[in-house]
Image (cartoon, helix red, strand yellow):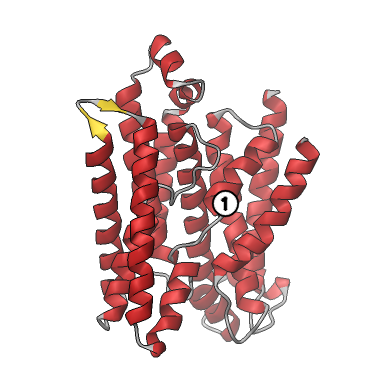
Amino acid sequence: MTDRRGRVLVLIALIALFAFFVGLLWGSAPLSWVAVLKALVAPSDDVTGQIVWQLRAPRVAAAFACGGLLALAGALLQVLLRNPLADPYVLGVSGGAAVGALGAMLLGLAGVAINVAALAGAMAAIGIVFVVSYRAADWNVYRLLLTGVMLSAGFGAVISLLLSLAPSAAVKGMLFWLMGDLSQAEGVLAAWIVLILASFVALALAGALNVLSLGHTKAATLGVAVGPLQLVVYFGASLVTATALMVGGAIGFVGLVIPHGIRLLGITDYRYLVPGAVLAGGGFLVVADTLARVLWAPQQLPVGVLTALLGVPVMLVLLSRRL
């Protein structure tokens, strides 16, 4: 069994690496795979080198980091909430970030200011959910989930209000942020640092997460400090989600479908699930973003649309094979 899980993990890593290369290869300017490999091995200042290193590589890196962050957050929240429908946005973090980002756009701000506003909104949502759901060192998971759902509904109403008040020239940019947009991705290095650190922490906690997936009562009986573990998972998943939102906006479906897909491949042990989800999520979003860039070129499509169009049939095939 261990050998099979290892082989599946290696296969996922190879597919993710191939997706990364495809993201560098495809674009509005045609490049051969030989030219791309040459630019990677021996960077130069010619046109091919500039396209690969200055245009495509930063965006592919942003897509991979964002996809890995979302998949990791989804895997963590699904074990925390013991709910297979949990995704990185179920606790209202996305709604808070969207209210902050759209509010900044409505005020005419741009660039870093939008990211700061999105981060402030996400942190506010994280704080509200924590204060409401955590009582006297006791965390009721059902209250946590209900608080997040109610907060998301409230933020959804505020988002609709902001869109209705926005001038028509600003609505398209707002909609792109809500559906995911990596064309103006910033803070890629910080996203990679968060992804690497969060992955190592999740791997260090993999044994405890495996026990927690059996239920809170069983986990406590088996000696797991359930309360502190829940706090670490909640704040870790929230931080990871907020980082992904700052990089690519509200990209949906990745955090829901990728952890499920990994489990349907027979990997439920978090020692393998965490790296598998990160690699698959990163590769999946790179492919989706590449298609968003080239399908309707020179116009770019919202990457969140492609994640759903790609993820739904893949998930249905996996489910049909499993059943």
Element class at badge 1: helix
User: What residue is rendered at 37% in x and 79% in y?
Assistant: 164
Give me the residue at 62% from left, 70% from top.
Answer: 290
Front-lying residue, 155 or 197:
155
Amino acid type, mark 1: Gly
Left-right relation of 302 to 151: right
* Residue 187 makes an appearance in the image: no
**Relative image position of residue 233 (x, y in whole percent):** 37, 35
Task: Identify the residue under disc 1.
Answer: 281
From this view, report whether residue 12 is shown above or below residue 176: above
Mark 1 residue crowding within 10 angstroms, few (<14) / some (14–19) / many (20+): many
Q: Is residue 82 left or right of residue 223?
A: right
Placement of 1 over or under 288, stated as above or below = above
**Rendered residue at 63%/53% (across/down):** 16
Task: Kindly indicate the quadrant of the structure image that contains residue 232.
Answer: top left
- Residue in the picture at 40% in, 89% down: 169
Across and down, in percent, residue 289 comes to 58, 68
Residue 79, position as x, y percentages in the image: 48, 32
The answer to whether any part of residue 34 appears in the image is yes
Q: Quadrant of the N terminus?
A: top right
